[in-house]
Amino acid sequence: MGYAGLQLVNTMFMQELCERMTRQFDCDQVMHQKDDLSFLRVDRDRLESALMYLKTHEGFVHLSFVTVIDYIEDGFFRLNYMLYNYDKATNIGVQVDITRENPSMHSIHHLWAQGWTYQRELKEMYGIDFPGSPRVDEEFVLEGWDGIPPMLREFDTAKFCEDRFAKRDGRESQDIKQTMRDNLYPERGES
Amino acid sequence: MKLKDLTSPFYVWQRAFEKPYTQSKPTLNREGAHAYRGFHINDIEKCVGCGTCEEICMNNAIDMVEIAAKDSKKGDSGLVPRFDYGRCCWCALCVDICTTGSLRMSNEYTWAADDPDSFRFTPGVDETSWQDSEHGYRRHPEYDLLKLVRPEMEMLSPDEGLKSFDEVVAGYTHEQAVVEADRCIECEICVATCPANMDIPGYIRAVREENFEEGLRLLYDTNPFSATCGRICTHRCEDDCTISTFGKPLAIRWLKRYIVDQVPAERFAEILNDEITENGHHVSIVGAGPGGMSAAYYLRKKGYGVTVYEAGASGGGMLRYGVPSYRLPDDQLDKDIDYIVSLGVEVKYNTKIGHDIEFQQLMDKSDAIFIATGMDQPSSMRIKGEDHPRVLSGLTVLNDVASHKDPGVGKNVAVIGGGNVAMDAARVCRRLGADVTVLYRRRIVDMPADKDEIKEALEENCNFVLQAIPVLIEDAESSDQVTIQWGEAEMIAEDGKRPRPVLQEDRMHTDTYDSIISAIGQSGDFSFLPQEISDQLKQHWGKFEVDQRQRTAVGKIFIGGDIANDVADAISAIADGKNAAIGIDAFVSS
Amino acid sequence: MFDLKRYSEAELESGKFTKLWHGPQHPGITGNMSLELTLSGDDVVECKTHVGYLHRGFEKLMERRTYIQNFPVVCRIAVPEPTFNEYMYAAAVEELAGIEVPERAEWLRCLNLEMMRLASFLMWLGGACGSFGMSTVYQWTVTHRDYMLDLFEEMTGARIYHMYISPGGVRAPLPDGFSERALSVMNGIEKLLYEIERVALNNHIFKMRSQDLGIIDPEMVDPYGIVGPNARACGFKRDVRKDAPYLVYDQLDFEVITADKSDAYTRTLVRYQEMHQCISLIRQMLEQMPTKGSFHADLPNVLHWKIPAGQTYVKSECTRGEYGYFLVSDGSEYLRRVTIRGPSYTHAIAVMEKLVVGVNIADVAGLMVSLHTYPPEIER
Ligand SMILES: Cc1cc2nc3c(=O)[nH]c(=O)nc-3n(C[C@H](O)[C@H](O)[C@H](O)COP(=O)(O)OP(=O)(O)OC[C@H]3O[C@@H](n4cnc5c(N)ncnc54)[C@H](O)[C@@H]3O)c2cc1C
Ligand code: SF4
Ligand code: SF4
């Protein structure tokens, strides 16, 4: 079967799968991004069983990564668990919204042997807790960090650098409009 | 274990007889690939200091700096980029985006120095060993980050246009406007070229973001004639648009028009929210052209009581009586003027200063006076017979048409001149059904008229006779006609000066027309000024001398518009009006 | 102070164990990360990995740069393989922005990626041999990698951080005469590979040290998310280039290479064969490459390029397996979130910590190299 043929089968498979998931796990949002990638939204407490189901019954044996998107303005984190089905060559992103206040989520370390690593990273970088996840409190890439988790949207990298590092001397840039005004029409165009 | 696994590795000994991989020293002179992204080179003659390189650099490695070798001028900020190689990653985004192609890279990649500050340098200014390098990265001609093409404006076909005085230019559609606005790189170089120094990138951004209310507010900060200027502005800004080095300049004028067209007149007050607190002072303005009305607007906003005296029956000056309605429909001019008047500006129409009211009266009762009476006196051709009854002035023809009178030009007309008035007169005559010949002393490239105007006149089948110098006007056989004698001219350049047309007396022609329309320039009439005042005001080439804020030698008197600036276009008059308001405010409150 | 006890379950006080920090310098070319090893005699009883020595916070930096400004940033996420980052970033942006890439650009990208794979494998192969004591091979492969870098320099304008694949296409077509020079480099590498086969892969000592070292049980593959040659060496016929063909892979002739036992030796063998495969793919592409047509799509003005809100995951097969970018846009000029998924995330941490137990200290570097990991893609 050529790739085009495969795509068609995949699309149907994905559509049916998403329907099954919606029925079974009340996924309230389904988004088909492309032939071989869809996103599903599930409830915080249904995530584990949804992942378990996808892994054991639907062939999504591979966990590509776990990540989070910070929607600071709306006060929530969106966790994203990206799974892959090798036979159908399709990805599914299972997403869960959790509140930004004291964020915490069920651990999936027992479903995938590398799951704890992602959770450890998310704890460090976003402050999301995964109770029961091995070594979740150990430092991951940071060492002796005492600021807020640095991947949070409110962590201002520019300000961090300004506070931390000296500015290099002799680095001044002139504003184009202001320079031209000063040199060419000093008294005109004010309000 | 296989025997082979023991013997096979000894193969390595064979290498002993081969040429080594290593090279002997010195190896430092290896030349980089031809398109290597090495150290920067900038041709500062070409660089216009637009700062786009600085803008795109994600490492913040570029500063725009002043240099001794270059001053600011229109279209060139005079600044050049200085590079901090402590930060640069040689991505060449700056080279890709450089609007003039002045910036590129050499294929040089070694530079050792013990002073870390020396790695901060200004290519093209600081001496470097690679500045003349032939090789190195430059943007591939087919790889464009700048958007060079302008959406095609919908216009009436020349045939269609000639049938009426309907507006020729349709204006951008929403989609076109947003696409066009997207091309702007916000370098702000054009702001200095705009006589009113409008925040051009700002209002273009408003179009891009589809925020027309914000757009209108930005326009009115510097220009209360935006519906008008959005149509007929001379758009000098576009000449200096940095995109025009490789592509079409931004359609700044059309984008301005697009903003005003999106906002119905009824909503102006609510959006602009011009709150007025009376300050008890009073200013008189002579002339309700763009100069006078613009001053009125900004003075009113500052709380001044404003009276505008206008000789004509309605406002707008030359915009009303000169510019034909297929370029600027009356209702658009009204849209601008009505809003200004709605702020409580008093306009006294049909009131000619020096005739209906003496100038001295204004001097006595006002805290300050702004004069913007424009130029409505046609210049003379200085040839015999020009007072022939079949010789009409372009201004008169246009004025008649604007006042819905028939100027009676006949069926076969010659227009003398190459400026905008000539083009307008010619195209108006075409619309009145005449065949039109335009006689101009020089070449097409020398014509002062707007390029678009020339193009459209040609499309409307005006017949251009170039390098033609009128010599004599005589009676024709029929008293309804007139004869003109003209000679061919050669363009002759003397000692490096701009070439001058020189009459070739052996190549003379005689033609007969129903009328000859003279449109070679105009001047102002200042007879309304009392002698002692007139004596104090300095003039130069028929224009009053004023400073940046339109001040004159007489404290109370401010002058602007066509009678004060050399440019003589609407936007300059508007800018003068605004700057006069600032000047007057400073004068009155001091 | 570092609290050893907190990290270790082995009774250090008993005096039976030794604690050893392996790294963060990298013997072989594993990149800067360190292994906190607990040894009993010469054998590892426990391992904890530590990352954080290199590039940190790329994903965060990217949230603060415009879409065009990010394209020179991403290559830095993996020194030996910048191109995959360039391609993945561009592909994700193009997908969300709805940009069609011209066909010629697809070929040029694909060629660039396979050249990258070969260059990266060369460096890796040298490291693999080096960490088993054969540093001569390392010199050979690094030399030939340098010839590859010369090609990159010509094609892209830079040797390491090419910044060649930009959103919309590529920045330039191939320079004149490139094919001939590339083919001659390919011939040289092919010859070199046969030499390496003789002196290293067929070397009794190399075999002794690498065979049966760090065996990945097929059962581990899915739970640990093992991909690429590490998984293919134990029979998993998985390769993104075949499973979800991108660029022009569906027009090229190649087979997924597998073996039946994923130990350090077989993994080397699989990669060795994949290098030959790279050469074949490069030759095919140089032959079929279109020489005319646009190589870059028309983009909106990049200085204020906004991309409609959306999210996607794009992936490709890098030397180490599935390499992907998860990109979330929110309609502004800045991306909302990017997550870079590299195979080392699991290979160098969870997998390494498991496989290294029981391994002799002398083989730890060899084992690590055999997993082919790049710490920068862990830290991002
Ligand atoms: C045919 C033509 C086409 C043009 N096309 C363009 C164009 O496309 N784009 C552009 O930017 N510019 C154009 N211009 C130029 C533009 O119209 C003028 O530069 C502009 O109108 C000047 O404004 P102003 O306020 O100085 O004077 P004007 O517009 O001339 O206004 C002066 C006003 O003062 C009044 N006035 C004069 N004397 C007295 C007095 N003694 N008492 C009371 N009132 C008096 C007049 O009646 C008039 O209304 C054109 C001009 C002409 C003639
Ligand atoms: S090459 Fe890149 S990093 Fe260097 S100055 Fe130009 S844009 Fe900035
Ligand atoms: S982008 Fe080019 S023209 Fe503009 S300032 Fe930089 S070097 Fe000069």
Image (cartoon, rainbow, N blue to C red):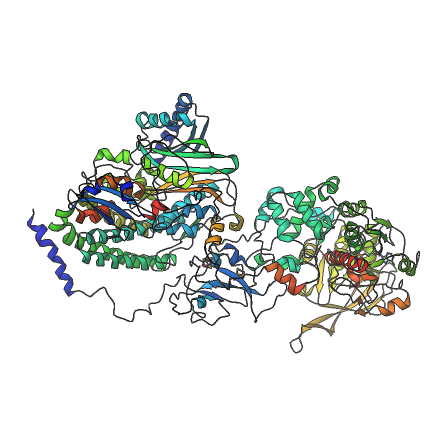
Q: Residue furthest front?
A: C13
Give the camera-side residue of C51 and C234. C51
User: Residue B54 location, x and y as percent?
Assistant: 52, 58
Classify residue B21 as left or right of residue B586: left
Q: Residue at x 50, y 40 (%)?
A: C330
Give the camera-side residue of A37 and B506. A37
User: Residue C305 location, x and y as percent?
Assistant: 52, 47
Classify residue B502 as left or right of residue B107: right
User: Residue B437 location, x and y as percent?
Assistant: 74, 59
**Vertical position of residue C142 compared to residue C214: above or below:** below
Give the camera-side residue of B425 and B58. B58
State the image quarter where residue A58 is shown: top left
Q: Residue at x 84, y 58 (%)?
A: B368
State the image quarter where residue A175 is shown: bottom right
Classify residue A184 as left or right of residue C141: right
Q: How many marks?
A: 0
User: Residue C283 location, x and y as percent?
Assistant: 28, 51
Q: Residue furthest bottom?
A: B495
**Vertical position of residue C191 compared to residue B544: above or below:** above
Observer able to see residue B78: yes
**Vertical position of residue C302 compared to residue A188: above or below:** above
Observer able to see residue C98: no
Give the camera-side residue of C318 and B513. C318
